[in-house]
Image (cartoon, rainbow, N blue to C red):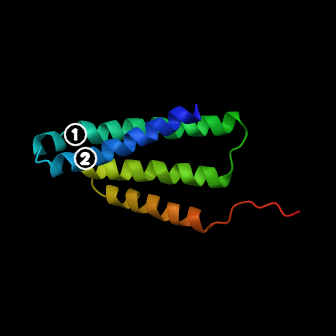
Amino acid sequence: MAKWGTYFIVGALLGMLLPFFFMMFDAFEISENPIFPVLSLFLGGTGVVLHLLNAVNSKTINSSSLLLLTSILSIIYGFSLNVLGVPNAKYLLLVGALLVAVWIMLPGSKKED
């Protein structure tokens, strides 16, 4: 289930980046299609939920994994909603970036013998 969650998150990232690749090749009609951000919303949300369900089922959920999944979801949603023109969606993107920074700064659990 985690493998499919990763595939969905990668699909969401491709849905976020694909319009920029189309712009490089002057295909502006295709790049401005709103299907790409909607696809990113759907795939990103599904991937994060699958990872969350996998962590709950395997009893390996902790605050670090929850923080990382929340940050990934807020980055994907913030970027996609910003492209769709939702006002103040850039702040959701900012919160996701700040959560990633906090996740990087927090030390992992290290067992000392």
Q: Point out residue 37 in the picture as x, y percentages from the top left corner.
A: 29, 42
Q: Residues within 10 Å of mark 2 (few under 14, many from 20)?
A: some
Dot 1 corresponds to which residue?
34
Which of the numbered marks, if any, corresponds to residue 84? 2
Q: Amino acid at mark 2?
A: Leu
Relative placement, left or right, of 33 versus 2 is left
The C terminus sits in image quarter: bottom right
* Residue 47, x across and y down, in percent: 49, 37
Q: Quadrant of residue 54?
A: top right
Relative to 64, 3 lies left or right: left
**So how many labels did they put on this image?**
2
Q: Amino acid at mark 1?
A: Pro
Residue 4 showing in the rendered view? yes
Task: Please tell me whether mark 1 sits on a helix, a strand or a loop.
Answer: loop
Residue 68 lies, with reference to residue 51, above or below; the image says below
Residue drawn 33% across the image and 55% down it: 89
Residue 32 showing in the rendered view:
no
Which of these two is toward me, 18 or 68? 18
Question: Residue 73: x percent and y percent?
Answer: 46, 48
Please say if the residues under marks 1 and 2 sit with CB atoms less than 8 Å apart: yes
Q: For the residue carrying disc 1, how many other residues have a C-alpha within 10 Å: few (<14), some (14-19), or many (20+)?
A: few
Quadrant in the picture for the N terminus: top right
